Amino acid sequence: MSVAAGPCLEVLPTEEAVATRGATLLAEALLDPQRPPTGLATGRTMLPLYGELRPLLGADKRFEPSGWRSFNLDEYVGLGPDDPRSFAAYMARYLGEPLGIPAARMQLPNGLAPNPHLEALRYRQQVQTHGLGLQLLGLGENGHVGFNEPPCDAFAPCRCVELSDATRQQNAAAFGGEAKAVPERAITLGLADILAAEEVLLVVTGANKSSVLRRVLQEPPQQLVPASWLQGHPNCLVIADRSAVCV
Ligand code: GLP
């Protein structure tokens, strides 16, 4: 795959190599006290990466769990940290508990807030107060980042969104395979918030993402492929395994 301009693409041989590279970059950002908080993501793509990150951080003398500072991209409306299907529970399971990070240091939108629209405003304000250093992103099969479903503009703010049928289907595994059990709404950072981060790291693995990744990198930025707006970010790195770049 050739990229004319915009994001820098690194193709690595395997999903494991992507996880190692991603974890190294993430650890550098998390361990630098001079940088603003790190933006974190959930999803299956991040599991091997967080698997590599845990021992990296655990072995580093600079790692101080009580100094952790991160903001997650999104959360389902109606799910709180006590629900194992929430993104808050995901973060606790894969990073917070194994590394002893206080839950309050890993911030996410509150899926149980009585008014999710107001919660999105509150969360955006909080993110803007601190700013974001490195923003980690996965890629939805329909081109979404966070839960910015197509069509989506580059100036979309943090907000409460309706999830598409495609996304509820894609994320059904965590809900007993039932797309209908996936919440209908979520709170997500918008493309505007994501593009305001100092640096963006998009991680893409698997052949099921290859056609959308090609559109993200090679087609003009457009509403129908929300991740394509990343082409306008001055410091965006895409790391992908070979299967995600070969059709
Ligand atoms: C989900 C999340 C995204 C995630 C993406 C890819 O719906 N909202 O933050 O990065 O879709 O998910 P996966 O890594 O499971 O393919």
Image (spheres, rainbow, N blue to C red):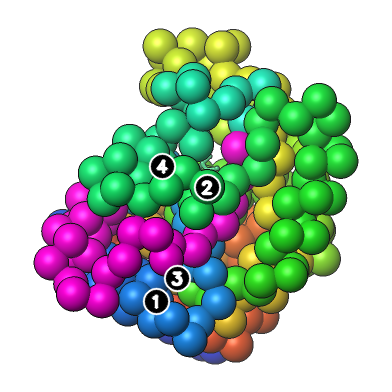
Magenta range: 47-75
Look at mark 2 in the image and give the residue it sits on.
Answer: 104
The residue carrying mark 1 is: 29
- Asked if ligand 1 lies within 8 A of label 3, the reply is no
Q: Nearer the viewer, mark 3 or mark 1?
A: 1
Q: How many marks overall? A: 4
In the image, residue 175 sits, relative to residue 167, either above or below, namely above
Tell me the kind of residue under disc 4.
Met
For mark 3, does the 10 Å Cα neighbourhood hold few (<14), some (14 to 19), or many (20 or more) residues?
many
Q: How busy is the neighbourhood of tag 1: few (under 14 within 10 Å), some, or many (20 plus)? A: some
Specify the amino acid type for callout 2: Ala
C-alpha gap between disc 2 and disc 4: 12 Å
Q: Amino acid at mark 1?
A: Ala
Q: Can residue 111 be seen here? A: yes
Q: Is the C-beta of the residue carrying label 4 under 8 Å from the nearest atom of ligand 1?
A: no
Q: Quadrant of the N terminus?
A: bottom left
Residue 90 in the image, given as x and y percentages of width and height: 40, 36
Question: Which residue is tagged 3?
Answer: 201
- Marks 3 and 2, how far apart at CA: 24 Å
Q: Amino acid at mark 3?
A: Leu
Residue toward you, 3 or 155:
155
Q: Residue at x 66, y 80 (%)?
A: 232
Front label number (3 vs 2) = 2
